[in-house]
Amino acid sequence: MSTRTVTMKGNPMQLAGNEIKVGDKAPDFNVVAQDLSTKSLSDFAGKVCILSAVPSLDTGVCDKETRTFNQLATGLSDDIAIITISVDLPFAQSRWCGAAGVDKVMVVSDHREVSFGQNYGVLVKDARLLARALFVVDREGVVRYTQLVPEITTEPNYDEVIEAAKALV
């Protein structure tokens, strides 16, 4: 198990799970779609995936990040899938996506099993939230890029993530 931490407003928070590194086989996960169906990494086989973990869509930075990726998705190949994962309930995610006009990013919930959080080492242990982190997985299911944002309340480097994904198409 990891002893890695991130901070939230300067306060350290311990992460649970093993750190995922570039070159690792991307672990599978079971998350819940807004229609309550189960989704896993295998549902995106053959695509380059940007996996965007966020603490909660109902916070300013997560809202902005997900809207930004939705906007950036319009200029990307159909071979790139952007999946945003949070522990928000699927009903709340559906409401948020409708209000925000997010329709190009798949937003899914890790609330049931937190398998994404644990398998990718981004589960904030005591808060049962996900850290802000991004992973780019190639068509063969290998992790080609990772970004763990050290301070949860700051945005990720969008350009790095998008360039990493585009390089794999």
Image (tube, rainbow, N blue to C red):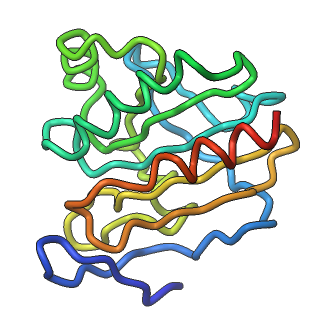
Q: Residue drawn at (51%, 33%), measured in percent from left and top?
A: 83
Query: Relative to 44, is 100 above or below?
Result: above
Q: Residue drawn at (48%, 26%), measured in percent from left and top?
A: 72
Residue furthest to the right in view is 140
Left or right, residue 96 beside residue 110: left
Q: Where does the C terminus fall, quadrant-wise?
A: top right
Viewer-closest of 132 and 124: 132
Viewer-closest of 119 and 103: 103
Q: Position of residue 18 (x, y in %)?
A: 57, 76
Q: Residue drawn at (55%, 40%), measured in percent from left and top?
A: 30
Left or right, residue 112 beside residue 146: left
Q: Position of residue 111 (x, y in %)?
A: 33, 43
Query: Relative to 70, is 119 above or below?
Result: below
Left or right, residue 80 beside residue 118: right
Q: Residue drawn at (80%, 59%), measured in percent from left and top?
A: 25
Residue furthest to the bottom in view is 3
